[in-house]
Amino acid sequence: MDLINILPDSVANQIAAGEVVDRPASAVKELLENAMDAGATQIDLVVKDAGRTLIQVIDNGCGMSDSDARLCFERHATSKIHRSDDLFAIRTMGFRGEALASIAAISQVELRTRLHDSELGTQVLIEGSKIVSQQPMACPPGTSMAMKNLFYNVPARRNFLKKDSVELSHIEEVFRRVTLIHYDLGFTLTSNGRLLYDLKAGSMLQRISQLYGNVYKERFYNVEEDTDLLKIKGFVGKPEHARRTRGEQYLFVNGRFIKHPALSAAVEKAYEGMLADHSYPSYFIGLQVDPSRIDINIHPTKTEVKFVDEHAMFAILRSAVKKALGQFTLATELEFNTPPEFNIAPAPKGYVPPMPKISYNPNYNPFSHTPNPSPKGEGSCKQREAVQSTVDFYNEQERNPLPSPPGEGSGVRPVACMQVQGRYIVTTLSSGLAIIDQQRAHERILFDQLKQSNNQSIRQSQTLLFPVNCQFSAADAELFGELLPDLRDYGFGIDAMGHCTFVVTATPPDMKESELQECFDRMLADYKSSTLQKFNNRSQSLCASLARQMAVKPGKVLTQEEMQQLVANLFACPQADMSPSGKKIITIVKPEELLK
Ligand code: ADP
Ligand code: MG
């Protein structure tokens, strides 16, 4: 019995389309690239319902003839290459002749296009790969490609689409990837009738600040290098602006955003010794290489590429970035190059140190509220037990507070603390010498505080003497508006003023007014990348992000009182040993280890 049959074109086209267009954002990428290949200087992107209902790209590029306007929807129809040799001399974004065929297979497309020297343009309507009509039409020179009702004929695909906010953030990411490196072109992005970005042609730094806000202008060093093999031009983030997420790391080759782990590693290597643990630099770096030394045809979306001279490129890129950082930040480098280990002199022979004793004030009650019972049983490593016993010890003090002597209040007679490297607090505990990461500790305290004010509506809030205005890009303002109810739960008083401006009238305690804008900017960046990573507990991740932004940073010198307060507050937290993002806060060196 014969079992094999040839799939009808419509099915074959849909299958092939899946490789190129899997969500609205990938169609956006293809259409923007076509407009750039057509030599456009102004490109307008319009989406409705995050691209579900409409994705339209209007350009002032070369336009197409009547017959090209039909032909462009055929598979392998391209004006960009003619023979296989051309594959190694590619100077255009597209070359596979697949995008429009794919788009036409899974949506209803209206193309309007006119050559610059033609009187009249042409309109083509195509649906599920079938041309429905073609007629002459008066239109401006250039091309408008409108794809409507994406996946209208592939319900399974349609059901895979995420909610609009997620799809729109993917579209914005594509928009950034394209516009960041093509800063010499004008772009707009309009979503549901609202103009989110209006980017004018200019320099790369101008483009960065148009996309991310003016504060970004101060955060980068220029990196520029010109070698036979490789030309580098871009911006690398100052180490102090490194972030907890790899969010803003953009690498481009010949005008194309790429993902290349080895080259990204080259950039990060250049920062060696300059960054706090688990923080990542931002960068926007454009590379130019000879097209014959690069293969972009190893993946349908062309974000993965191969280089003939990868090793050499790695070395050049790393040293270029090093140079950019080193030229300006010698002081920082020296500061960070001091080894982080403690220099504890070896004990003299035969010396038997006395057992360390913990001193504490039995009258001290640092807690104004009752913390939750300590969680138990989450792994029982020694380290954890030691920390837990200390937590229990502190909590015990709280449950059985002794009356304070009259007149003395509940002041701290406290254990002395020492700050090391502007990052760690060293103090003695019942279980030994504790080395506490000040930032993570503070993060934990703030996280618990914020969460509590959210859950129990015992909101702690301080009214600002002078309200502070915060300003965002249009897209961020929209997102920020969505998050307002959560922020209010955390003790912020915020109102929208219009024009992407918000006025902050109150904040949670301990928050610096001067850091509000930065805190919100980082929170939004975190939030966007966490939506992309499909975090589902929005309130939890928002709370963690806020705590991270508000926490004291490494390098902040703390007074004795501040350190003691921090330590006391930390041990009031049920999970004092771990930061909200799961990082270890305390390392305990036991007395017997000290002996060694
Ligand atoms: P590719 O970009 O790989 O050539 P596409 O399917 O994206 O394949 O496009 C097919 C052809 O249609 C292009 O090669 C180009 O000649 C033409 N085309 C597509 N979009 C435009 C546009 N915006 N302006 C002018 N020509 C276009
Ligand atoms: Mg194309």
Image (cartoon, grey):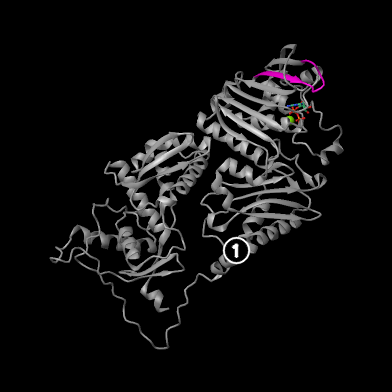
Q: Quadrant of ligand 2?
A: top right
Q: Quadrant of the C terminus?
A: bottom left
Q: Does 458 lie within the magenta span?
A: no
Q: To which quarter of the image does residue 54 belong?
A: top right
Asked which secondary structure carries label 1, the reply is: loop
Point out the stretch of residues depicted in magenta. Answer: 108-120
Give the residue number, with chain letter if any, for mark 1. Answer: 329
Judging depth in this view, the residue of 350 and 100 nearest the camera is: 100
Judging depth in this view, the residue of 214 and 481 nearest the camera is: 214
Residue 147: percent from left, percent from top: 64, 21
Outermost residue to the left: 406
Residue 550: percent from left, percent from top: 41, 52
Judging depth in this view, the residue of 144 and 1 nearest the camera is: 144
Q: Does 114 lie within the magenta span?
A: yes
> Residue visible at 45% across and 82% down?
346
Q: To which quarter of the image does residue 395 belong?
A: bottom left
